[in-house]
Image (cartoon, rainbow, N blue to C red):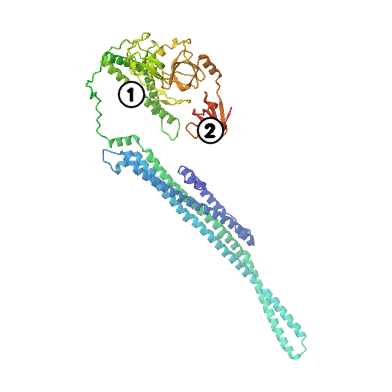
Amino acid sequence: MKKRLGCLEAPNVAHCSEMMTSYKATFQCVAADERQRATYGQALPDQVDRIAALFDAHSKSLHHHIFQVREIYRERAALEREYAGKLQLLTKKAAEKKAKMEVSYVVGDDPTKSWDTNTLKQNSLNTAYDEIIASMNNTTQDHFNIADALNAEVVVVLAGIERRNEEAKKKEMQFFQKLLSDRDKYYANRLKYDDECAEVESFRQKQGRAQDDRHAERAVKQAEQQRNDMLNSKNTYIISTAIANSAKAKFYNEDLPAFENLLSESLQARLVDRFVKILIHSQNLSLTHLDKLKTRITGVDSKLKQVNSRKDQEQFIEYNIRHFIAPDDWKFEPSSVHYDTDSMNTEPSPKVFLQNKLSKCSLQLQELQSILNTKRRELDQLSQRVSQYKPDHLLGEVDKLTDNHLEAQHQLMSYTTSELVLNTEVDTIVKSIGNDVGAGKLHAFKSSSFSIPTSCAYCKSSIWGLSKQGKTCKLCGISVHNKCELKVPADCQNSTETSSVTMTRTNTISSRNSIRGRPIERIHINYPSSITDSISTSTSSASSFSKEEDYPSALVLFDFAATSEFELNAAEGTTVHIIEHDDGSGWVKVADKTGSRGLVPATYLEIGSSANTSRKTSSTFVKQRVRALYNYEAGGNDEISLKEGDILELSSGPSGGTNFGDGWWEGFDAHGRKGIFPSNYVKLI
């Protein structure tokens, strides 16, 4: 059924027009071939029975074709009407939704300038949308019209000629029977002559047996009368024979050929010609319908090419201009319980805090400068590629390019905001303390846990806890609370570095968060203070790393590619040494065998008790893979779906892979997603 309506699809209008023209030419050739045939009366004399049988067979076949074509067009008309009804409903819904939305996307929900319907029509996108809906509405009526035309001018007409052809056939066969009866009735006069001859012979025999002279005369008269009747019958028979011969000649030379020609021309050929003409007319109806559809499509195409997004934006701006005043700056407000001024306090203790904060901000600005420059170059390259893009109707690389361009803009905006924050902090502090940056011997604090009470070097109170309640200087060994870190003077006895404040602008650092046991998704966060404080020192002294230092070792579980200056590339299966443990940020500072230092996600590492253990683990670590035997749909967030034939990699660790639990294994699918799945649905490979 879809094939019967195939030419209704708008994109195939030209193709359908060619098909209709081809069908029309074919039907015309069939009609011409029918007219060029030799007549039955000339070529097949006295073959009425065979011609009638052929006509019956031809009529049945032709009537079957007419019936089938009539049914096709009847169903085609029904489908056209059904499609028109659905399209009409769709158009109505689209028009209602557009009526509710058009004001919002043309002039906004709260325009500052009065508008009317002409304003809406000035929007090029809204005008194109109106044309689409109008085209759909007109197309709906076109389909209703073609349905009515096919039903009235094809289906009904085919049914009529089929019925009338049957009636004409019956009438012609009745006339043929009349011709036969008219021909045969003249031969019947011979039978009357035979009867008269028999009567004459009978009277003659009776006359010879007559004994009574009284009846002899009467018998003679009767015999004479009978003989005269016989002679009259003879003459009538001779005349009838002549008439029959003349009638026979006329029947076979004129009437029968004419009748056979009537059958072939008036009924058979005329029926075929009318059938073909009706089909040609149906194709003309379809061609006209397709021309109307093409006109609708052309109108929409013209309006779409006139869409001007910049002009529409300018119109929106025109109807939404408002007077804008930026909010007032925040001002220092004294506490209600303690009077104070808006000047920075530079007493000795607050000044130490400011000096440490200034040093920290300056280091972060220096470290972020290279990242900010890199992001700006990356954004310039992406902007250039986006400007060279020409819109098309396909999905593909351009979507990825656009996403990358937007993401680069977002990152740069975030970085410049962080740069502004750091510069504002530096400017504000410098304005208060000037060039007095203190001793400049910075402590190298790192987060620590305290299993026994330890005295804070600043406040002298105890530090105690296993959840990293404080920090310890790696150089001089003093310990302080987290809250006391910036209050301690920068006078580390073992520090050889002298802080110098440089007023350069930089950006914040992009980091990556992680979920235990699988590759982590990127988000924007700040690294922990202990990491950023020591990152410069760590980088500059990477070459001084010694294997003799008692750093714990760890095995890298997954490949990790560094995305900033603070991170370190790590290959799966290699061994690294932990310089600083995870302080709750999800990152661990490590050193590789070359002495390079940097951050890697904590979930990418499996920490060992010693270097030897780590190396042994690394050398014996073997990836295990499985193949899915059946399809499985994940039933929870911790599960992953399977498709028959999928290859999965099992996770490692004491609670991963085949050690996860009874009947369940843990692993990674082809997209890197980690989850559990039934063990009886897979097979080790």
Q: Quadrant of residue 430?
A: top left
Q: Residues within 10 Å of mark 1 (few under 14, many from 20)?
A: some
The amino acid type, in three-letter code, at marker 2 is Leu
- Compute the Cα span from label 2 to label 1: 44 Å
Residue 287 is tagged as: none
- Badge 1 marks a residue whose secondary structure is helix
Pinpoint residue 290: horizontal percent, then vertical percent.
45, 47
Residue nearer the viewer, 600 or 306: 600
Residue at figure coordinates x 76%, y 90% from the top left: 212
- Badge 2 marks a residue whose secondary structure is loop
Q: Residue under label 1, please give it.
A: 417
Mark in front: 2 vs 1: 2
Q: Quadrant of residue 129?
A: top left
* Horizontal side, residue 397 vs residue 617: left or right: left
Q: Residue under label 2, please give it.
A: 642
Residue nearer the viewer, 289 or 104: 104
Residue nearer the viewer, 630 or 53: 630
Viewer can see residue 296: yes
Residue at figure coordinates x 36%, y 43% from the top left: 98
Is residue 486 depicted above or below 402 in this figure? above
Pinpoint residue 187: horizontal percent, then vertical percent.
66, 71
